Image (cartoon, coloured by chain):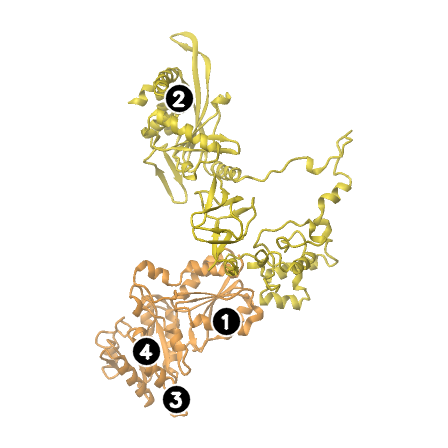
C-alpha cells in the first residue's frame, strides 16, 4: 500500500513548516531513516526522515511551500503503485496526482473560471494564452475535477444548478476534493444576480502589472520626472517561520499577560573584580572566559531558588499557577533572522564555567540555526541583554509561559557618592517585566533585591 | 404529568394494560418473586398473582416458545428477557415461529406478543453481553421493533405494543432504567408504533438517534447551537416499521444527515437509513450521509477500550461539522 509522508510536528510551538529543500527525487529508492527533505520550523531547520522503505512516488509540495502539520508532503510505495487512495485520504485534488495529464481539461476550466479563484492549472500543463499569467496552486485547493475529468458536485448542487440554468463547470467547488456543494451554487447565484451582465473580463486580473504600468501612475510627487512604479515603493519579503512565531508569541504575551516593570540600579564594581579573578583562573585552565552575562544568569538562577514565586507560570487554560521545581534560564540570542532563546537547564546548580561554555556553544549553534527545538523549550525564566549595544535600560516582553523576563542594560561609568565623596563608579540597570497575574510588585522587588545583593557581593553565589 | 423512572413508566404501561385485559400476562426470569432483575415488575406479583406474573427457569428457548404458543391460542403474553443478549438461544422461536407462522398459516394465527428487555451495551460486560440487536430483529419481515428513548415514550409505546396483534420486540436499556422523566398521566396514553419524533427542529443537519444515542444527539445539537447551527434531532422511536417519511422530509430541509447508532456498523440500522436516504432523497443531499456507530469489533472489557468502542459525542459533533462543510 502506498505510504503517506506528512509534515511532522518538530517543535512544541510549530504550526507549519516550510519545505526548504528536497534531498530526494521522485523515483528514488529510500529506506527508513533516510532524510528526504529539510524543513524550516519556527525554530530551526530540521531533517525530514522517512519511517518506511519504498520508492518516492510523488512529491506534493514545492520547495519554499509552507505546509501545515499533518498535511501530505510526499507518497512512498512500490514502483508504479496507485497513490490515489492516499491522495483521497488527505483530500488532495486529483490534478496534482495526475501531473500533466488532462491538459485540455485543465485549460478548458482555466478559461471558464475567474482567475483569482483557485485555478485548476495542472502541474506542468502546457498553458494556453489565458493561463500564462496564472500561478500554480498548491495541491488540494479547489480544483473540482477528478482523474477522469468528471466534475464533483453534491447531488443537491447538481439539481440546483440545473434548476437555475447554471453551467456547473463554471463553478468552483469548496467542498472536499473540490466538490461543488450547495453553498457554492448559492454564491454563484448571488454573483449572477449582482452582476446580470457579463462578469468582469478575466484578463484584467490575469495581467495586472503590465496593464497598470501603461496607465498613468497612481500619483506623482511634485517635480518628480521619473514615474513611480508601484513595485518600487517597497520590497515584500514573505514572513519567515521564525518571524511569524516571534510575532505570534510576543503578541500573545503582551496582549494577555498584564506586564509591569521594576527597574533597579546595581553597583557592578564587585562583579567586575570577581570576574577579573575568575578569568585569571579560566585562562590558566584554558576554559572559556566567563562573561558578565554568565554571572547574571547564575545570579538570577540562585535568586530564583530563593523566590520560587518568580520561577512560575500562570496557566489560564489549565486553571493553575505552576511553580517550577527546576530553574531553567533562557538566554535571548540575536541571530540574523530574529532571535532565539537557548535554555541553560538547572542553571542554579551549574558552575560559572559550565554556564559560560554552554551559553557560548548554544549561541554559536543558534546562529547557524542548528539548535534543536528541545534546547529552546522549557525556560522558567528568561534574560535579554542589550548592554553590548550601549542601551542603558529597556523593557522586555515576557517569554510565555514564564512569569518574568529580565532586561539587562549596559554597565556604565557614573559618578557615585561614596563616604560623602563623589567618586567614579560602575553601575548597571536591570528591568524585570512581571506578569501581574502571578507576580505582584512586592514579590518582584524582593527578587530584584536578592539579585542586587548577589551581583554587588558575588561571593554570595558561592554560598 | 408525573416524574417517573424509565422502569416505573414501563411498569405503569404493563399494569394499566393488565388491569384492562385479563388475557395479558407477564412471564420471564425473576419477574415475580424477585420483582424483576431490574425491578421493572416490582409489586406486580402482589397485584396480579402467580397466574399472571410467572417466574421461569433459565430457559429462554422454552419460555419464549411458551409465550408464542400462548399467543397463537389467544392470550397476549409479555415475555421479559433479562437482556436481549439472552434472546439468541431463542432465536429460532422468534425468527421462524413468531415472525412467520401468521404468513405461513394464511393469517389463521396472529401473534399478539411483546418481547421486552434491555438491549445493547451496559458497561463492562464484555463481548457476549453488550450486543445491540436492532438490526438482527429488524431484518426479519413479520416482526416489529420498538426502541423508546424516554420514560414517557416507553409508556406510550409499550401500551401500543401490547395492544398490537403482531409480535413486537421492545428494546430497553439497563443504563436507562433509572432515568427520570415527565410521563403523561393522560388516561390511556398511547404513542403510535411506526411514527418518529422530531425532538428538536432545525435546518442545519439532521441527527437520527435512538436509545442511549438519543442523548448523545441532544448533546451534539446543543454544541452545534452554541456554534450557531440548529440541528434537527429525530428519534425514530420505532426501528421497524421505520418512519422514513419523517427522516426524508427532514433531509429535504437540511440536505445532510448524521446517524448515531450503537450497533456494530455492518448491515446495521444506520446502513439501512443511509440506503433509504440515498434512494429517496438523492437529489437533496449536499454531503454524504455519515454515521457514528460502535466499532466493528466485539465489545471489549477494559473500561478505556469500552469507552472508545461506543459512539462518542465528539465524533458525532465532528461528523456534523464535516457534512456542513465547516
Q: Nearer the viewer, mark 4 or mark 3?
A: 3
**Subunit that carries the residue with mark 2:** A
Q: Residue at x 43, y 58 (%)?
A: B314
Residue B57: x %, y % from top left: 22, 79
**Does the rendering let one see residue A351?**
yes
Q: Residues within 10 Å of mark 1 (few under 14, many from 20)?
A: many
Residue A346 lies left or right of residue A195; in this view the side is: left
Q: Is residue A345 above or below residue A110?
A: above
**Same-chain status of marks 4 and 1:** yes
Query: Residue A29, percent across and down?
Result: 48, 52
Badge 2 marks a residue whose secondary structure is loop
Q: Chain of mark 4?
A: B
Residue at numbered disc 4: B14
Mark 1 → mark 3, Cα distance in angstroms: 30 Å
Q: Secondary structure at mark 3?
A: helix
Name the mark on residue A289: 2
Q: Identify the chain drawn in yellow.
A: A
Q: Residue furthest top?
A: A421
Task: Give how far apart the Cα atoms at labels 4 and 3 are.
Answer: 25 Å
- Mark-to-mark CA distance, 1 and 2: 79 Å
Of badges 1 and 3, nearer the viewer stands 3
Q: Are marks 4 and 3 on the same chain?
A: yes
Choose mark 1 or mark 2, whichever is in front: 2
Q: Residue B247: which numbered mark, if any?
A: 1
Amino acid at each position: 500500500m502506498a505510504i503517506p509522508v506528512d509534515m511532522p510536528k518538530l517543535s512544541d510551538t510549530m504550526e507549519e513548516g516550510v519545505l526548504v529543500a528536497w534531498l530526494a527525487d521522485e523515483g528514488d529508492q529510500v529506506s527508513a531513516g533516510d532524510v528526504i527533505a529539510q524543513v524550516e520550523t519556527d525554530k530551526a531547520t530540521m531533517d525530514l526522515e522517512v519511517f518506511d522503505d519504498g520508492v518516492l512516488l510523488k512529491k506534493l509540495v514545492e520547495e519554499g511551500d509552507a505546509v501545515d502539520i499533518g498535511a501530505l508532503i510526499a507518497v512512498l510505495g512500490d514502483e508504479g503503485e496507485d497513490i490515489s487512495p492516499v491522495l483521497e485520504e488527505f483530500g488532495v485534488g486529483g490534478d496534482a496526482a495526475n501531473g500533466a495529464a488532462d491538459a485540455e481539461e485543465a485549460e478548458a476550466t482555466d478559461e471558464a473560471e475567474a482567475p483569482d479563484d483557485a485555478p485548476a492549472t495542472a502541474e506542468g500543463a502546457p498553458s494556453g494564452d489565458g493561463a500564462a499569467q496564472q500561478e500554480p496552486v498548491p495541491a488540494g485547493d479547489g480544483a473540482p475535477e477528478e482523474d477522469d475529468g468528471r466534475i464533483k458536485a453534491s447531488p443537491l448542487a447538481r439539481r440546483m444548478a440545473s434548476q437555475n440554468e447554471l453551467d456547473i463547470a463554471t463553478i468552483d467547488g469548496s467542498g472536499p476534493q473540490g466538490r461543488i456543494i450547495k453553498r457554492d451554487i448559492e454564491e454563484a447565484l448571488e454573483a449572477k444576480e449582482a452582476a446580470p451582465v457579463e462578469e468582469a473580463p478575466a484578463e484584467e486580473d490575469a495581467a495586472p502589472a503590465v496593464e497598470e504600468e501603461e496607465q498613468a501612475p497612481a500619483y506623482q510627487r511634485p517635480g518628480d520626472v521619473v514615474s513611480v512604479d508601484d513595485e518600487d515603493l517597497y520590497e515584500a519579503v514573505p514572513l519567515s517561520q521564525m518571524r511569524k512565531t516571534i510575532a505570534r508569541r510576543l503578541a500573545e504575551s503582551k496582549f494577555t499577560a498584564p506586564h509591569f516593570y521594576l527597574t533597579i540600579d546595581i553597583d557592578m564594581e564587585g562583579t567586575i573584580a570577581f570576574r577579573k579573578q575568575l578569568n585569571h583562573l579560566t585562562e590558566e585552565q584554558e576554559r572559556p572566559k566567563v562573561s558578565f552575562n554568565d554571572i547574571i544568569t547564575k545570579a538570577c538562577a540562585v535568586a530564583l531558588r530563593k523566590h520560587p514565586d518568580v520561577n512560575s507560570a500562570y496557566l489560564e487554560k489549565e486553571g493553575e499557577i505552576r511553580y517550577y521545581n527546576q530553574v531553567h534560564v533562557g538566554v535571548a540570542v540575536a541571530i540574523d533572522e530574529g532571535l532565539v532563546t537557548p535554555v541553560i537547564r538547572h542553571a542554579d546548580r551549574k558552575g560559572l564555567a559550565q554556564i559560560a561554555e554552554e551559553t557560548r556553544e548554544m549561541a554559536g549553534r543558534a546562529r547557524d540555526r542548528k539548535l534543536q527545538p528541545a534546547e529552546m523549550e522549557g525556560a522558567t525564566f528568561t534574560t535579554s541583554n542589550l548592554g553590548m549595544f550601549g542601551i542603558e535600560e529597556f523593557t522586555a516582553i515576557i517569554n510565555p509561559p514564564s512569569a518574568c523576563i529580565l532586561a539587562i542594560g549596559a554597565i556604565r561609568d557614573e559618578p557615585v557618592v561614596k563616604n560623602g565623596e563623589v567618586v567614579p563608579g560602575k553601575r548597571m540597570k536591570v528591568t524585570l517585566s512581571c506578569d501581574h497575574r502571578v507576580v505582584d510588585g512586592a514579590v518582584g522587588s524582593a527578587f530584584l533585591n536578592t539579585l542586587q545583593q548577589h551581583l554587588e557581593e558575588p561571593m554570595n553565589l558561592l554560598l | 404529568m408525573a416524574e417517573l423512572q424509565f422502569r416505573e413508566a414501563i411498569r405503569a404501561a404493563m399494569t394499566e394494560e393488565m388491569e384492562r385485559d385479563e388475557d395479558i400476562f407477564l412471564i420471564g426470569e425473576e419477574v415475580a418473586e424477585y420483582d424483576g432483575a431490574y425491578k421493572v415488575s416490582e409489586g406486580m406479583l402482589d397485584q396480579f398473582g402467580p397466574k399472571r406474573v410467572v417466574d421461569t427457569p433459565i430457559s429462554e428457548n422454552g419460555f419464549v416458545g411458551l409465550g408464542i404458543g400462548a399467543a397463537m391460542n389467544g392470550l397476549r403474553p409479555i415475555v421479559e428477557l433479562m437482556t436481549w443478549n439472552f434472546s439468541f438461544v431463542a432465536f429460532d422461536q422468534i425468527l421462524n415461529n413468531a415472525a412467520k407462522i401468521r404468513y405461513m398459516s394464511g393469517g389463521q394465527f396472529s401473534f399478539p406478543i411483546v418481547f421486552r428487555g434491555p438491549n445493547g451495551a451496559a458497561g463492562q460486560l464484555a463481548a457476549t453481553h453488550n450486543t445491540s440487536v436492532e438490526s438482527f430483529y429488524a431484518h426479519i419481515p413479520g416482526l416489529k421493533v420498538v426502541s423508546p428513548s424516554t420514560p414517557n415514550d416507553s409508556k406510550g409505546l409499550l401500551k401500543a405494543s401490547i395492544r398490537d396483534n403482531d409480535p413486537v420486540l421492545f428494546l430497553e436499556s439497563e443504563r436507562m432504567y433509572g432515568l427520570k422523566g415527565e410521563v403523561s398521566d393522560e388516561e390511556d396514553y398511547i404513542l403510535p408504533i411506526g411514527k418518529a419524533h422530531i425532538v428538536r427542529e432545525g435546518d442545519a443537519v439532521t441527527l437520527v438517534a435512538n436509545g442511549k444515542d438519543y442523548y448523545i444527539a441532544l448533546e451534539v445539537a446543543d454544541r452545534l447551537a452554541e456554534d450557531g447551527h440548529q440541528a434537527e434531532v429525530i428519534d425514530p422511536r420505532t426501528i421497524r416499521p421505520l418512519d422514513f417519511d419523517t427522516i426524508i422530509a427532514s433531509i429535504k430541509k437540511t440536505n445532510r444527515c448524521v446517524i448515531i447508532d450503537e450497533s456494530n456498523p455492518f448491515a446495521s440500522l444506520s446502513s439501512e437509513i443511509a440506503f433509504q436516504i440515498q434512494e429517496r432523497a438523492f437529489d437533496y443531499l449536499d454531503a454524504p450521509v455519515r454515521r457514528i456507530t460502535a466499532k466493528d469489533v466485539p465489545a471489549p472489557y477494559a473500561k478505556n477500550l469500552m469507552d472508545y468502542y461506543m459512539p462518542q459525542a465528539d465524533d458525532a459533533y465532528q461528523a456534523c461539522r464535516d457534512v456542513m462543510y465547516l
